[in-house]
Image (cartoon, helix red, strand yellow):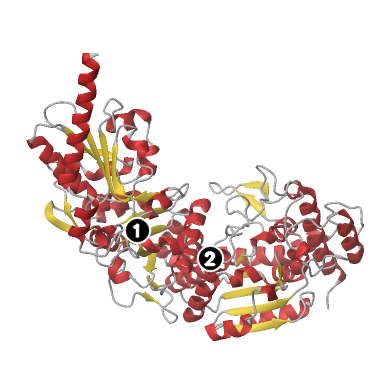
């Protein structure tokens, strides 16, 4: 039976949501009004969470995948008294979400953004809003919880026991990423994962019957989930029983289907699309408050006793559980110091001492190897000293060379401590899971062919938005993959990925640039990085003749310069095309033409360098510049300038052996040489004309 104080807390959540949306004249009031009883019961009666330390490693995770209902989360963070702790020294900087912040809902520089944003307010576990992403993240969090338990728990020292809860909307369950993620979670038998599905039967256009007629419960049962059904979101006792069923069911994930009324209590807009994505209006707000027995003219009211009730529930329980955990952790450190040290590294995102010394160097080799091959060698060297570096591929590990070598390393339902994840052909879910793993402190990587980055782009964008150090390994990076043809040959993909703010895109030229890329990527703590790697072999450049590969860290560097004076022309290449530029450089030298070769593995890193450095690599006075990249030509104008030439792709590729494709599309040393000579001859004609005049 719901107590009066419980109902008072629930209605406080509802009215705060209505008032905030109304004040902002923007937002989604209906779902917080509907799900307040469910969210309140979960937090107050079940969640393993200490509001005084929202970064506690063994806290339960609560993911509001239905990010449009953000005021539901903000109200909970405020009422539960979640604190904002300094990540450096742990000092208390005040409430994570104050009442004043709620009053500033959806306003510039406020913590209560329109959709929850990780890092903006403590207690927001992940950025949600693009539907399906939050539930995908929750699968990664559940995998991480089981992985941490498998590696670090010891008899008498169960440091990791936390569960993951996610609230999903109709839209979440319609999005394809949720299908992929749910299928994977069922396969892995993630018994620590519970999705709460808000079955309110309303979307922006109207009834879900307009576009959806499947039975989610039956679908999830087919995925291998346990399914509970709650006929009324207001029946908190029945919801507690559903949570108890989840606690008893540890051999598979649980879906709780909750039938709710969007805009519950609104006299005219309950169960309508108008309650979903717009303010209710002053009269409707007053009518809903009248229905709740609330003062109709009160705004942002938190009645006496509400926050105290939260403190006596989730606050007291969480404090006790965390203190017990801290005590166990101290004893654990004394008995298992090496494992405790690893956990310190994970929590602080530090790397082991001497990690970079493991990275191999590669001797010069005219035949060379594919950069996917050298990347696989570097990855395995790093994995040997960084146990929390885990990842996998979307069914392409043999091609992407991303398997960590060794027996018994597959992460499966019966081996949750494995390091090789098998995502299946689920690129979208893979990206969302990687974000969940990173949010849990692990260092994840995911791999596929570059052309299929299209399938995983939304979570890549969110990794950049959340400043997560996720690693993406994309191979088969150009028309160089050959016979598979234009369906598999990426053209516009590098340009598209370079457009994502905060993402570092790296296209290394040879094995030693690959090594330097990994050396650059691993220390990152606040941005994702993407490797674009070749299928075909590329020469390992002789670094005794040409510049060292450590220039990769600056995004671009001078690989080769002419011996007899300033260069007349600059050849800029990335990836497999750098060796073509080197060949052209040597051919031009035979003809007495002085050229510079610039390897530019990363636009982003080069653009971040000081102007003096950029000008030293690409001198402004040298206007004869040629860029060479087997990808979309767009964007290179910023580096070659108005007088430069871009040798790139302006169409899709074709199905043929790689050498034939190179000739067809102009990616040969001969074509680069001819282009350089043509530019210089044209410049000389202009100069002669100017002298005559």
Residue 565 position, x and y percent, is: 15, 26
Q: Which residue is mark 2?
A: 137
Q: Is residue 583 left or right of residue 427?
A: left
Query: What is the distance, in whole Å, between disc 1 and disc 2 at their CAs?
Result: 27 Å
Label count reads 2
Quadrant (top left, top right, bottom left, bottom right) of the N terminus: bottom right
The quarter of the displayed image where residue 412 is located: bottom left
Residue 602 at x, y = what percent? Answer: 34, 45
Give above or below for 620 relative to 460: above
Q: What residue do we see at 53% from left, 46% from top?
A: 88
Q: Nearer the viewer, mark 1 or mark 2?
A: 1
What residue would you read off at disc 1? Answer: 490
Query: Could one spot residue 543 in this view of the protein?
Result: no
Residue 132 vs residue 441, the one in the foreground: 132
Task: Pick whichever, 316 or 567, lies toward us.
Answer: 567
Helix, strand or loop for disc 2: helix
Instruction: Give the image quarter of residue 254.
Output: bottom right
* In the displayed structure image, the side of residue 38 where residue 1 appears, left or right: right
Residue 431 horizontal/vertical position (percent):
46, 64
Q: Is 143 in front, or is 309?
A: 143
Question: Taking 128 as reference, is 154 above or below it?
Answer: below
């Amino acid at each position: 039976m719901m107590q009066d104080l419980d109902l008072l807390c629930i209605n406080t959540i509802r009215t705060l949501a209505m008032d905030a949306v109304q004040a902002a004249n923007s937002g989604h009031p209906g779902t917080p009004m509907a799900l307040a009883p469910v969210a309140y019961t979960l937090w107050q009666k079940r969640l393993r969470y200490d509001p005084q330390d929202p970064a506690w490693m063994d806290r339960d995770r609560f993911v509001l995948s239905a990010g449009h209902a953000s005021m539901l989360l903000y109200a909970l963070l405020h009422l539960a008294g979640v604190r904002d702790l300094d990540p450096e020294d742990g000092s208390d900087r005040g409430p994570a979400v104050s009442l004043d912040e709620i009053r500033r809902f959806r306003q510039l520089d406020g913590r209560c953004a329109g959709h929850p944003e990780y890092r903006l307010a403590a207690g927001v576990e992940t950025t949600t809003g693009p539907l399906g992403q939050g539930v995908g993240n929750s699968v990664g969090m559940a995998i991480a919880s089981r992985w941490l338990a498998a590696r670090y728990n010891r008899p008498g020292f169960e440091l990791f026991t936390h569960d993951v809860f996610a609230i999903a909307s109709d839209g979440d369950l319609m999005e394809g990423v949720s299908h992929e993620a749910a299928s994977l979670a069922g396969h892995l038998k993630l018994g620590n994962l519970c999705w709460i599905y808000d079955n309110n039967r309303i979307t922006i256009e109207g009834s879900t019957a307009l576009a959806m007629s499947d039975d989610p419960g039956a679908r999830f049962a087919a995925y291998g989930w346990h399914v509970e059904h709650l006929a009324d979101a207001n029946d908190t006792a029945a919801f507690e029983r559903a949570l108890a069923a989840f606690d008893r069911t540890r051999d598979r994930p649980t879906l709780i289907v909750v039938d709710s009324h969007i805009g519950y209590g609104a006299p005219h807009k309950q169960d309508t699309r108008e309650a979903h994505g717009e303010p209710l209006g002053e009269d409707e707000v007053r009518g809903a408050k009248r229905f709740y027995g609330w003062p109709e003219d009160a705004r942002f009211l938190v009645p006496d006793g509400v926050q105290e009730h939260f403190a006596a529930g989730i606050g007291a329980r969480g404090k006790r559980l965390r203190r017990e955990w801290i005590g166990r952790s101290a004893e654990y450190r004394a008995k298992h110091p090496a494992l405790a040290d690893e956990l310190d590294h994970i929590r602080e995102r530090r790397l082991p001492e001497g990690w970079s010394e493991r990275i191999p160097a590669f001797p010069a080799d005219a035949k060379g190897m594919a950069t996917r091959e050298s990347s696989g060698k570097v990855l395995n060297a790093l994995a040997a000293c960084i146990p929390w570096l885990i990842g996998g591929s979307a069914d392409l590990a043999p091609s992407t060379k991303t398997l960590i070598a060794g027996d018994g390393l597959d992460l499966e339902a019966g081996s949750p401590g494995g390091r090789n994840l098998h995502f299946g052909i689920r690129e979208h879910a893979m990206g969302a899971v990687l974000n969940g793993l990173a949010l849990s402190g692990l260092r994840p990587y995911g791999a596929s062919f570059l052309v299929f980055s299209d399938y995983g782009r939304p979570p890549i964008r969110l990794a950049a938005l959340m400043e997560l150090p996720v690693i993406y390994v994309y191979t088969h990076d150009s028309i160089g993959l050959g016979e598979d043809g234009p369906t598999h040959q990426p053209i516009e993909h590098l340009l598209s990925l370079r457009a994502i703010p905060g993402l570092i895109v790296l296209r290394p030229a040879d094995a030693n640039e690959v090594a330097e890329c990994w050396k650059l990527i691993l220390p990152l703590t606040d941005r994702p990085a993407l490797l674009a790697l070749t299928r075909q072999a590329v020469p390992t450049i002789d670094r005794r003749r040409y510049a060292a590969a450590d220039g990769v860290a600056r995004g671009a560097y001078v690989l080769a310069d002419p011996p007899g004076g300033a260069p007349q022309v600059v050849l800029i290449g990335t990836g497999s095309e750098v060796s073509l530029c080197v060949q052209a450089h040597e051919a031009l030298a035979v003809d007495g033409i002085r050229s510079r070769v610039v390897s530019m593995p990363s636009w982003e890193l080069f653009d971040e360098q000081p102007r003096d450095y950029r000008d030293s690599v690409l001198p402004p006075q040298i206007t004869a510049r040629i860029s060479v990249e087997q990808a979309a030509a767009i964007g290179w104008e910023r580096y070659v300038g108005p007088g430069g030439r871009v040798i790139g792709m302006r169409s899709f590729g074709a199905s043929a052996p790689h050498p034939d494709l190179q000739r067809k599309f102009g990616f040969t040393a001969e074509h680069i040489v001819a282009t350089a000579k043509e530019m210089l001859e044209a410049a000389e004609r202009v100069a002669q004309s100017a002298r005559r005049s």
